[in-house]
Amino acid sequence: MPYYINHTNGTSLVTVADGTVDNTTTSINLVGKSFPTYGQLFNQNFVNLLENFANTSAPDTPLIGQIWYDSSNKNLSFYREGSTDSYWQKVAMTHEGTTAPSDPRLGDLWWDTNNAQLKIYDSSQTPNWRVIGPQTTNNGQLNVTSATGLVIQVSGNNSLQIDASSAIILNYNPCFYGYGHTSGAASIIGSGISTYNSWMPRPLSTTIDKGTNWDAVHSWFNVNTTGIYRVHSSITTIGGGNINLKWQVSGSDQNISSTNNHTSSELHNLTCSGLIRASSGTYIQLLWSADSSASVSTSNATYSIEFVG
């Protein structure tokens, strides 16, 4: 009478006929009734299972959920069902203690009980044990030993600088600062109060930390960090008439605008400043417009955008 072998879930695996042994369906020997030397095969099966098939290569014909000890890399894996193909999934080795474990392998985890931090081993990095978290010890205090001080950066923009005596010496370093205007004339004549133009700082004007964020073709600042930005602009108006300034984020007005309306030809200063919340992937832009009777100076102008958090 044959043996009908099933999976744990009850589905059929294989039928083993009398007097035969099946050693191709699984990684162990499935012995049929009255097969000679069956005792040796049974004992060998038990040893394989006790060792979790310890070997330098994975066992043949594994079943889902089977465990294998990789004696070459000294780690444990289990045979996992994938969406398209099943595969051997490494089980992360975990250690705990005040000192790093000896003879670690790539991907091993260590709970550093001395610093209350979880670390992962990567021999290609320095140090080899990389901190997963928390990133700070001492109740969240980050202790930095430096003779010159510390600069905290957000997406490459200097946002906070602390000197060696723990004093803040630079609150907000501008993301962008421009001066003047690209036109070479003494002033720029307006073309209509409703016709807005991009304000383009001079290419040779002073710029601080503009990096790759500044787009000189479109005259706007590309936002790569979501947060609050302080914007400021200041121009000198010449002649009589209306002159407008306004800030936009990706073409949308931010309710930050200024208007100067005067009839005399005296110089007047017009500023437009405020806080803007902008998301990564958008752009910040300053626009201006003026009556044909009004103009703005190409030299007396400032333009800045700062990330403030």
Image (cartoon, grey):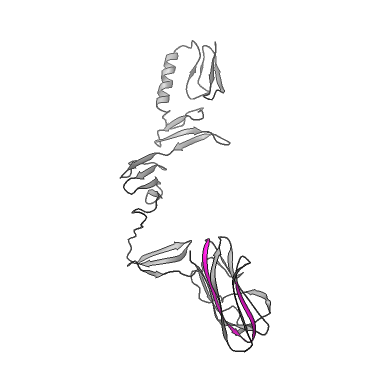
Residue 120 is a magenta residue: no
Q: Is residue 39 left or right of residue 214?
A: left
Which residues fall within the magenta stretch?
Answer: 223-246
Q: Quadrant of residue 301?
A: bottom right
Q: Quadrant of residue 153?
A: bottom left
Which residue: 52% across, 65% down? Answer: 228
Could you tell me residue 175's position as x and y percent? 50, 68
Q: Residue furthest bottom?
A: 265
Which residue: 35% across, 48% down? Answer: 116
Q: Is residue 140 above or below residue 269?
A: above
Could you tell me residue 297's position as x and y percent? 59, 83
Identify which residue, 219 or 193, lies in the foreground: 193
Which residue: 45% across, 66% down? Answer: 158
Q: Is residue 173 left or right of residue 240?
A: left
Q: Is residue 185 visible?
A: no
Q: Is residue 131 above or below residue 27?
A: below
Could you tell me residue 192's position as x and y percent? 69, 79
Which residue: 62% across, 77% down? Answer: 244
Dominant secondary structure of the residues highlighted in magenta in the image:
strand
